[in-house]
Amino acid sequence: MRRFPDGWQPPFRPHRPTRISARVGRLVRFAGQAGLLIATAITLAPRFANARDALPIERLTLPPGFHVEVLSDQVPGARGMVLGPKGTLFVGSRAQGDVYAITLDPSRAYAAKVRTVASGLNMPVGVAMRNGALYISAVSRIVKLDDIENRLDNPGKPAIVYDKLPSESHHGWRYIAFGPDQRLYIGVGAPCNVCKRDENRYAIIGSMKPDGTDWRVVARGVRNTVGFDWQPGTHTLWFTDNGRDLLGDDVPDDKLNRLSRPGENFGFPYCHAGDVADPEFGQEKRCSAFTPPVAKLGAHVAALGMKFYTGKQFPEDYRGSIFIAEHGSWNRSRKVGYRVVRVVLDAKGNVARQEVFAQGWLGDDESVWGRPVDLLTLPDGSLLISDDYAGAIYRITYRKP
C-alpha cells in the first residue's frame, strides 16, 4: 500500500526556542568570526546539528519508568536499521536514496557523527549486516558494501549481490534481514493494492545465500511486509503484513503472522486478515485454505517494523515481547496508528494481549509530527525507533521509578 507520495516531506513547524538552538546559534556566529564554513561548526557539534528547534518529544507518552530522547534528528527519511559489530548504526531511507552510518557517543545517548555511506540508490529501505558487510535493498537489486565499518569515510561503490527482484516501485521498498540460518530474507510486496500475480515472484518472503545464490520462496500470500524477526529460542519467523485499501475505515486489519513451515500461504489476494474475503478474488479460494494471523493489529495502522525485545534493561515481563511500529494511516477518515505497540506472549508463545507502548506523534487535532518505522534493541537494552517523517532516531531507556 502506498503510504504517502515518494519524496513528500512534512511541512516546517516552528517550536519554542530552546537552549539547544541557542547553542547552535553561538556555534554558527563563532564559525563566521573564524572564517569557517557553517558546516564545520555543525560537524563539531553533531548532537545539535539541526538549526531548527528540538523535536517535541515531551508530547510522547510511555509507561512509568520509560524515557525517550532524540539520538539524532539528522537522518532524513530514516527507515530500516541494523547495528554493525563495531557499534555503528546503519539506517536506510526511501525517497532520499541514501544510506546513513551513525557513530554513537560512548554513552549511546546521542549521535557523535552521521555520515552518508551510499547515495543515489532506488528506495534503499532495508539494511542488514553479515561478516562486516552491509547489505542494502534497492528494489530490483540487493547490493553490499564490504568491510564497511573500516571504510566509513571512503565506502566505495556498492557491489551487486542479486539483481533479479521485481522492478515495480509500488510496494517495491524491501525489508531485509539475516536469519538464524545465515540466509538473507527479503520481503517482496504485491505491485498493487490488490491483484493476482505470479505467486512465486510477488507477495512473498524469499531468502537466499549471502552470495545471492539459491533463491527460495519462504512464504506466499503476503501483501506487503516491511518488518520481520525470529523468536528467540524457537527461531520461528514472525512478520507484519499490511492489509489492502478501499474497503472502508475499519476493514481489513493489518496482521501479525507466524511462519510454521516453508511455503506457507497467508491468503493474499483472496483473503485478508484471516476472515475477510476479497470482493474480487474471494470467490476463487476460501479463507479457510490459508494460515490466519496470530494477531489482528487494526485497519490502516500501517504496521511496519517489528522486533522481539532481547535486552535486559526493561522490566523482566518485557523480555520476549514484540514491539511493532505503526507508521500510521493515510486514507482513513480519522487517522490511526502513529505509535509503537507491545504484543505480549504467553508461556506457550501465543499472543496474550496488545497494549500501547509509545504514542504522541499523532495529536488530538490529528496533526502529525512523526511516523515510527523500524525498531532495534541496542546491546545495553535500550530500544531505538526510526522516524522517516521527522528524519530522526529515538532512544528509549528504562529506570525503575
Image: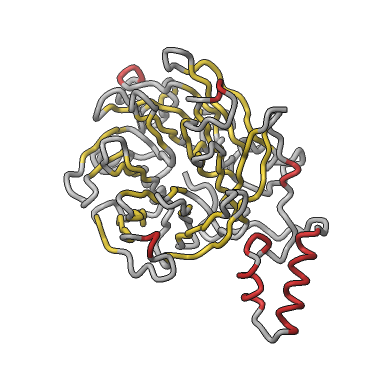
Residue 5 or residue 377, whichever sits in front: 377
Image location (x, y in percent) of residue 6: 51, 58
Image location (x, y in percent) of residue 215: 20, 44
Image location (x, y in percent) of residue 140: 31, 55
Is 239 placed above or below 45 here? above
Tell me the residue at 58%/29% (across/down): 314
Asked whether the viewer can see residue 384, the reply is: yes
Residue 51 or residue 289, whichever sits in front: 51
> Farthest residue in the right direction?
16
Count of marks placed on residues: 0
Asked whether the viewer can see residue 139, the reply is: no
**Quarter location, residue 183:** top left
> Farthest residue in the left direction?
214
Is 128 placed above or below 225 here? below
Residue 395 or residue 136, whichever sits in front: 395
| Left or right side of 180 for 55 | right
